[in-house]
Image (cartoon, rainbow, N blue to C red):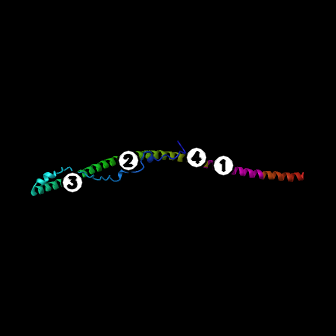
Amino acid sequence: SQVGMAAPANFLEKHGVQSLPASASQPPAVQPAAVPSRMPQMDPGMYGQLDGAQRARLEELRAHTSEMERKQNEMEAQFKASQAKEKFYQKSLQDLVMFKSRTDVALVEIGERLEREQAEEKKLEAMFNERLAASQSTQQALASRQQELDGLFARKMELKGRVEEMRGVGGGGI
């Protein structure tokens, strides 16, 4: 096992899972481009030859055609905007699916690492408790021996004092 191992690199950064994809904001705004009219121009000479009723009818038809062309252009612009939005949402959905996949992988790896670290921690805790019990036992044995040694030393000093006393008593009286 690797005791004292440095902290691992952040799994989220390792897998490129910093935050939600940037494209998950808003769809791009599509500005309709000005479309030139496709209506054919009138020949001024021919227009001048028409009587008032024909001119009014022609102007009415041109106005109606112009309005229809404007509506067609609007619908085409809306269709293009809808296509752009659909493309945006498809891309955003794909980005989110990929983001979720990377997040899931990182989560699984972090879970596996957590399990390994917890097992290592339990093993180290058991070793610590075993050594703590052994050191406490050794400490108690040492304290007991120290008391014995202190007792023996006191007894030695007492006996030494008696011997000195006997030499003093015996040496002066003999």
Q: Amino acid at mark 4?
A: Arg
| Marks 4/1: CA–CA distance | 16 Å
| Residue 99 disc label | 2
Q: Position of residue 29 (x, y in %)?
A: 31, 53
**Residue bearing mark 4:** 131
Mark 2: secondary structure: helix
Q: Position of residue 28 (x, y in %)?
A: 32, 52
Closer to the camera, 127 or 69? 69
Lower position in the chain sequence, tag 4 or tag 2 = 2
Lower position in the chain sequence, tag 1 or tag 2 = 2
| Marks 3/4: CA–CA distance | 89 Å
Q: How many marks?
A: 4
| Marks 3/2: CA–CA distance | 43 Å
Which mark lies nearer to you, 1 or 2?
A: 2
| Residue 70 disc label | 3
- Magenta-highlighted residues: 136-157
Mark 1: secondary structure: helix
Would residue 155 be counted in the magenta stretch? yes
| Marks 1/2: CA–CA distance | 62 Å
- Disc 3 to disc 2: CB gap under 8 Å: no
Answer few, some or many: residues within 10 Å of disc 1's Cα (few below 14, many 20 plus, some between 14 and 19). Answer: few
